[in-house]
Image (cartoon, rainbow, N blue to C red):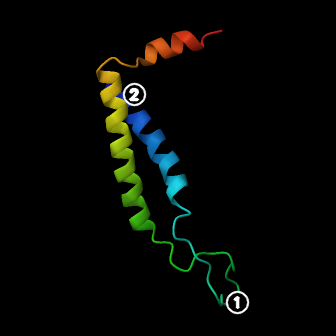
């Protein structure tokens, strides 16, 4: 896998994981101030969620890279099978 492909795959996995991790531990603000959205989280913990997302992505990307590097799965073979 060349570096550009690896970077793109990493970024795609990271964004998917981010959207999966964002809802974790969210609790609504009990008494929101006037003008604030009542559905906004009290403590979004974004830094923690970004670190968790990065950790999960590194693990998943490492597994995917290992499978592709060991030639168990080839992106070129997959693209050849998908052609119509």
Image quarter (top left, top right, bottom left or bottom right) of the C terminus: top right
* Image position of 50 with respect to 65: above or below: below
Quadrant of the rendered structure where residue 48 is? bottom left
For residue 76, side relative to residue 35 (left or right): left
Residue holding disc 2: 5
Which residue is identified by label 1? 34
What number is the disc on residue 64?
none
Tell me: 43 left or right of 53: right
Above-or-below relation of 64 to 81: below
Q: Residue at x 53, y 9 (%)?
A: 80
Numbered disc 1: secondary structure: loop
| Distance CA(mark 1)–CA(mark 2) | 47 Å
At mark 2, the secondary structure is helix
In the image shown, does 14 or 69 lie closer to the viewer?
69
Q: Is residue 21 above or below residue 69?
A: below
The residue located at (37%, 32%) in the rendering is 64
Q: Earlier in the sequence, mark 1 or mark 2?
A: 2
How dense is the environment of label 1, judged by Cα within 10 Å: few (below 14), some, or many (20 and up)? few
- For image coordinates 43% across by 62% down, the residue present is 49
Q: Residue furthest front?
A: 72
Tell me residue 9's x, y (percent): 43, 34
The residue at the point 44 percent across, 46 percent down is 14
């Amino acid at each position: 896998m060349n570096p550009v492909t690896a970077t793109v795959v990493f970024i795609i996995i990271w964004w998917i994981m981010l959207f999966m991790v964002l809802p974790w531990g969210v609790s609504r603000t009990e008494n929101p101030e006037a003008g604030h959205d009542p559905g906004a989280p009290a403590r979004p913990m974004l830094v923690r969620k970004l670190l968790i997302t990065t950790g999960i992505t590194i693990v998943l990307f490492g597994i995917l890279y290992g499978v592709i590097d060991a030639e168990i799965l080839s992106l070129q073979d997959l693209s050849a099978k998908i052609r119509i």
